[in-house]
Image (cartoon, helix red, strand yellow):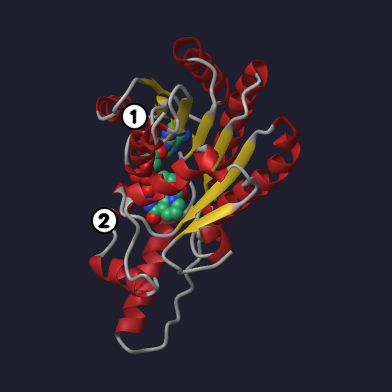
């Protein structure tokens, strides 16, 4: 086995793999020899991801916030590709219907106009008071419940087959900085809590679980953000730029492999130095 095939013979599952980081992570794990099962809401995007893989892949359109759909997707992957040894909980969103984002962005623009005019900023950028139960649950359902359902399904597969697997959840620097909408930041902080609790629980089985906390990363999620906001964001990063998806994929693949064999319960910060955990 060469260094370049450190995941040879392993089966990996990546969620939210239709674009952005999830696609880059799938490609990286495939380059390293893994057979990769990819999940996303968007079936067409998944087909493109699979066509870009180096090795064998399998796509299943699946909403990770639906526990029954997750269980059935993992059963299909296990039947087709074999028992799962790597899971990457990457699917995530910062918005959901009824979460008050539209009102919040309007208020933010109003406040920015006040600041740009050189006056006192009088507008409060409210978000919480516009957030309906549905909006809160929509984001928590994908970012937190989804990661829980997938982790449970992957660990059941690992335990059945006696596999000493590796699970990686994509958190965010926002969990530390608090910057971002309350449902998003809470979900990412909770993912870190889940990582720590499960690192203790699963350690005796030699199953490792870690998180990666990216800062701003150049994925489609960034489309539509005004250029000036991007510049301001990059100026606040000591390395002076956003991450590229492949840089996050490199961090994930290291945690997936035995190269990180003593790491569990950790948060690998990949944000160019903007916040420290
Ligand atoms: N891009 C950033 O700056 C950044 C920074 C920190 C953390 N993150 C996190 O990294 C992860 C990937 O981000 P990205 O920038 O590639 O996002 P993205 O929006 O480009 O891609 C997310 C993918 O997840 C899929 N998805 C969304 N809801 C889903 C669901 N219910 N079930 C299955 N798939 C679903 C989407 O269809 C999409 O393909 C997310 O968890 C995000 O919160 C991103």
At x 33%, y 47%, the residue is: 246
The quadrant of the rendered image in which ligand 1 is seen is: top left
Q: Which numbered disc, 1 or 2, marks the residue that appears first in the sequence?
A: 1
Element marked by disc 1: loop
Q: Position of residue 53 (x, y in %)?
A: 29, 28
Judge from the rendering whether residue 49 lies leftward or rightward of residue 77; answer left or right. left
Check the image and report above or below for 40 versus 140: above
Outermost residue to the top: 79
Q: Which mark is residue 42?
A: 1
CB at mark 1 closer than 8 A to ligand 1?
yes
Between residues 107 and 17, which one lies in front from this camera angle?
17
Residue carrying label 2: 224
What is the distance, in whole Å, between disc 1 and disc 2 at their CAs? Answer: 20 Å
- Locate the N terminus by quadrant: top left
Outermost residue to the front: 1
At x 35%, y 81%, the residue is: 114
Q: Position of residue 198 (x, y in %)?
A: 70, 40
């Amino acid at each position: 086995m060469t260094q370049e095939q450190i995941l040879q013979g392993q089966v990996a599952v990546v969620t939210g793999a239709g674009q952005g980081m999830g696609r880059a992570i799938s490609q990286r794990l495939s380059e390293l020899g893994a057979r990769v099962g990819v999940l996303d809401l968007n079936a067409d995007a998944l087909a493109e991801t699979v066509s870009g893989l180096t090795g064998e892949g399998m796509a299943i359109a699946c909403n990770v916030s639906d526990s029954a759909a997750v269980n059935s997707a993992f059963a299909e992957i296990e039947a087709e590709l074999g028992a799962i040894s790597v899971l990457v909980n990457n699917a995530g969103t910062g918005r959901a219907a009824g979460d008050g984002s539209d009102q919040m962005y309007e208020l933010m623009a109003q406040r920015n106009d006040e600041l740009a005019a050189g006056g006192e900023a009088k507008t409060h950028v409210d978000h919480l008071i516009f957030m309906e139960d549905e909006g809160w649950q929509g984001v928590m359902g994908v970012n937190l419940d989804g990661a829980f359902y997938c982790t449970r399904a992957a660990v059941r597969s690992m335990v059945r087959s006696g596999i000493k697997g590796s699970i990686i959840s994509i958190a965010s620097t926002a969990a530390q900085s608090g910057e971002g909408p309350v449902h998003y930041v809470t979900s990412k902080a909770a993912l870190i809590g889940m990582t720590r609790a499960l690192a203790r629980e699963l350690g005796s089985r030699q199953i490792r679980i870690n998180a990666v906390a990216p800062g701003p990363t150049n994925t489609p999620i960034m489309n539509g953000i005004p250029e000036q906001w991007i510049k301001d964001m990059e100026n606040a990063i000591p390395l002076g730029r956003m991450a590229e998806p492949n840089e996050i994929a490199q961090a994930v693949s290291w945690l997936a492999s035995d190269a990180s064999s003593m790491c569990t319960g950790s948060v690998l910060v990949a944000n160019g130095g903007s916040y420290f955990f």
